[in-house]
Amino acid sequence: MRKLPPALWILIAMVIGVVLGHMVHASFPDIKVASEIAGYISIISDVFLRLIKMLIGPLVFSTLVVGIAHMGDAASVGRVFGKSLAWFITASLVSLVLGLIMANLLQPGANLGLPLPDIGSSANLATSKFTVKDFVSHLVPKSFAEAMANNEILQIVVFSMFFGVALASLGEKARTLINAIDELSHAMLKITGYVMKLAPLAVMAAMAATVAVNGLGILLKFAVFMGDFYLSLFLLWGLLVFAGYIFLGRRVFKLLVLIKEAFLLSFATASSEAAYPKILDALDRFGVKRKISSFVMPMGYSFNLDGSMMYCTFAVLFIAQAYDIHLSLGTQVTMLLILMLTSKGMAGVPRASLVVIAATLNHFNIPEAGLLLILGVDTFLDMGRSATNAVGNSIATAVVAKWEGELIPEAEADANALQLDKEAAATLANPAHG
């Protein structure tokens, strides 16, 4: 049984979850009863995601501080930061533009054939959070403990950058502290390994709870919208892989094979955070040095949400089309630029894409009630968005490593991967000494 690859376990769990959810939905047609049962089923996936959130802060801090300390100086940190940001901004623009083009070409909201929510209805989402002023002031933590407690990845990154550069400048004086934080990162990765054993169970519970409440029938109602969105996502995956191919050559396909488990995990749980530790492991096996991956990945989780970016433009235009509101090309370009800025504060806000969309709808006088149209299927769409974010961040990190000359040759990476597999097998065989 243990010989089955983890990715296959996750696929099997997804199928079982869908079947289980469908059985609950068919047996309990009353939405309140189904929701209550789904609440109990989702306890497993909730606990799993809470465990992941418990790990993210210390994991980002320890791996990033050690990575920056090993870079040696502030100039190296600045260079990697600049290259990462250039990739993130370009990828974000491409994602937003693709969403705009596809929504205009496919017209998913035209002739919808569904009753439209009353224009006066509200989706009850706080939209005031997304101003550039708030985002910039939110970058810097008032307290490192508060940033860790609230899992504010971007604030943890800012503090870790200062801390890492300071340790690097202290040289030998800081050697003991660097070694201690390095040991902390290994301990966090070990805990991550234990938590990941729960992944298939969490996937099954997440899928079952979603289908139990919504049923598979809702997918038929929104088949055109969801089909158009996933077609657009496939095109975005193609563009991301093509960009990776330009810089990494055929080796990019090796990376896709390595991240398949992380991809499925983020898809099934609708959370790219759940895949973070798995992506770090996949990048280790691919040959990206940890000092690059531990720096670029946390930044990517705040600045490089490609799937979420595309969804923002796609969903806003879908709602405008549903209410037969024509947006000129100039208005659409303005909307794109506003989304480019506001979406950078997405990280750490629950259902952030919806909040950003709500703020954009208000800005352009499109009925916010339109959000109620897509709330029912948002979880199914969030699966695709989260998986796309995982792919985008993996490719971005590998490309930045290549630019920095920190991507080890393929043969050496394969040897490292074999060593990691041996260590994992030894831990499984003798967990007490793992």
Image (cartoon, rainbow, N blue to C red):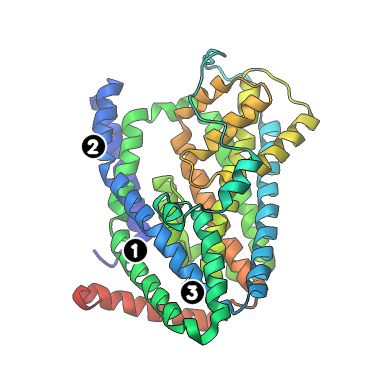
Of 224 and 305, which appears nearest the observer? 305
Q: Residue at x 43, y 52 (%)?
A: 146
Q: Of the two numbered discs 1 and 2 on the same chain, state the one appearing first in sequence.
A: 2
Does residue 426 appear in this view? yes
Quadrant where the image shows the C terminus: bottom left
| Residue 434 higher or lower than 400, as above or below | below
**Identity, as a three-letter code, of the amino acid under mark 3:** Val
Screen quadrant of the N terminus: bottom left
Q: Quadrant of residue 262?
A: bottom left
Q: Which mark is residue 40?
A: 2
Q: Which is more N-terminal, label 1 or label 3?
A: 3
The residue positioned 69% from the left and 19% from the top of the image is 325
- Residue 66 lies, in percent from the top left, at 49, 74
Per the image, the residue denoted by label 1 is 192
Which residue is identified by label 3?
Answer: 66
Q: Earlier in the sequence, mark 2 or mark 3?
A: 2
Quadrant of residue 111 within the rendered picture: top right
Task: From the viewer's side, name the closer residue of 292 and 396.
Answer: 292
